[in-house]
Image (cartoon, grey):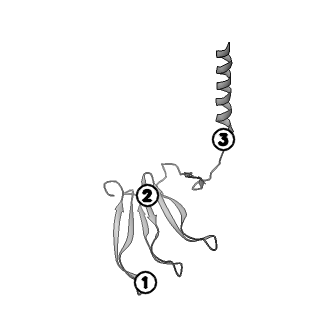
Amino acid sequence: MNRHILMVLIAGAMFLAANVGAKEISLDMGETYRHGDLTVTCGQPLTVDKPLALNDCQYWDDFNKKCVFEKTTYTFKNLECVEECQHWDKFSSTCYYRTTCSFFPPQKLFVQTSCDKFDDFNNICLKKSDIKIGPGYR
């Protein structure tokens, strides 16, 4: 008899514990939900030959409590290319060079352009390079 009561109590506790923290979230395409170290993003159907673009804050102004520069992450299936500020001036809160991503649907690859040589005095990129991101590449 005691064994049955104990099993009923354990089953009841497990049932209650499973439902206590339950939460339902509805996301639109491309929308992101964050809670602690969990990030969930609503993607798009894998049949679409177009990358999904998600913006996230790269540089945050703690004083004014706002994002001063957003990076964009492009995702296509298991490929990812990030457009972000490569040369940032924290005193003027200015991005002098942002990497770029180009997507080529027939080849199913990204080409990311970045700055290899930057002139800090004139704030310009002197030499750029391209990296292919796709099947058979990086």
Marks 3 and 1: CB-CB under 8 Å?
Answer: no
- Separation of residues labelled 2 and 1 (CA atoms): 28 Å
Marks 2 and 1: CB-CB under 8 Å?
Answer: no
Where residue 45 is drawn, which disc sits there? none
Q: Amino acid at mark 2?
A: Glu
Where residue 123 is drawn, which disc sits there? 1
Nearer-the-camera pick, 108 or 60: 60
Q: Quadrant of the C terminus?
A: bottom left
Q: Amino acid at mark 1?
A: Asn
Q: Is residue 112 above or below residue 78?
A: below
Q: Is residue 70 above or below residue 8?
A: below
Q: Secondary structure at mark 1?
A: loop
Question: Going 38% across and 70% down the picture, which residue do you hit?
Answer: 113
Question: Going 47% across and 60% down the picture, which residue do you hit?
Answer: 74
Question: Going 62% across and 53% down the picture, which residue do you hit?
Answer: 28
According to the picture, the residue beneath numbered tag 3 turns out to be 21
> Which image quadrant for residue 55?
bottom right
- Separation of residues labelled 3 and 2 (CA atoms): 33 Å
Q: Is residue 40 above or below residue 118?
A: above
According to the picture, the residue beneath numbered tag 2 turns out to be 80
Q: Earlier in the sequence, mark 2 or mark 1?
A: 2
Q: Amino acid at mark 3?
A: Gly
Q: Secondary structure at mark 2?
A: strand
Q: Residues within 10 Å of mark 1 (few under 14, many from 20)?
A: some
Nearer-the-camera pick, 9 or 92: 9
Q: Is residue 4 above or below residue 64?
A: above
Kindly report which numbered mark, 3 or 2, lies closer to the viewer in this rendering: 3
Where residue 54 sits: x, y (%)? Answer: 53, 60
